[in-house]
Amino acid sequence: MEKKKQNPALYLTQGAMIAALYVVFTLAANAFGLASMAIQVRFSEALTILPFFTTAAIPGLFVGCLISNLITGAQPLDVIFGSLATLMGAMGTYALRRNKWLAPLPPIVANVIVVPPLLAYVYQIPGGLGYFALTVGIGEIISCGILGMLLLFALNKYRAVLFPDRE
């Protein structure tokens, strides 16, 4: 089977749009105060399902998270490691793209591993790592697992139009 050649302009455009959406959704969650409670629900994390459809989502999510962290005033270590957690999650989603039910797991796991130490040691928020893992996990299950899967099912109907270069 011959591999379809990817259109570089489409790849760049999709990645840039995904990055922009990530930033807009992050700012919306912050405006509604959903990203600053014990259980943080970030609409932007639902987009971590997009590597199921296209590899352009991987750099798009990473850049979107990096920009979001920078403009929302995250600490430097959070900018670096939070963005890397999103990158790892996106790569994992792409790796599991053959099973849509497993696709939201990598970003959930990546954030449950990376974010609690940031909350405890960088931001010095009172609470233990176990508590932070639980609250981050609940937020990620809502964002990636529920909202992300709703997005997957909504976009799946139009994937041939939205993602014509699908690998």
Image (cartoon, rainbow, N blue to C red):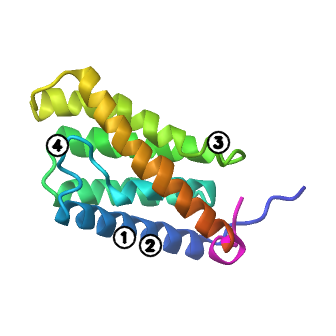
**Callout 2 touching callout 1 (CB < 8 Å):** yes
Kind of residue at badge 2: Met
Q: Is residue 74 left or right of residue 155?
A: left
Q: Earlier in the sequence, mark 3 or mark 1?
A: 1
Which residues are drawn in magenta? 159-167
Kind of residue at badge 3: Leu
What is the x, y in percent for residue 126? 9, 27
Mark 2 crowd level (few <14, some 14–19, many ≥20, 10 Å Cα): some
Q: Which mark is residue 96?
A: 3
Q: Nearer the viewer, mark 1 or mark 4?
A: 1
The residues bearing labels 1 and 4 have C-alpha atoms spaced at a distance of 21 Å
On the image, numbered disc 1 is attached to which residue?
A: 20
Q: Is residue 167 left or right of residue 146?
A: right
Q: Looking at the image, can residue 15 be seen?
A: yes
Q: Which mark is residue 76?
A: 4
What is the x, y in percent for residue 4? 78, 64
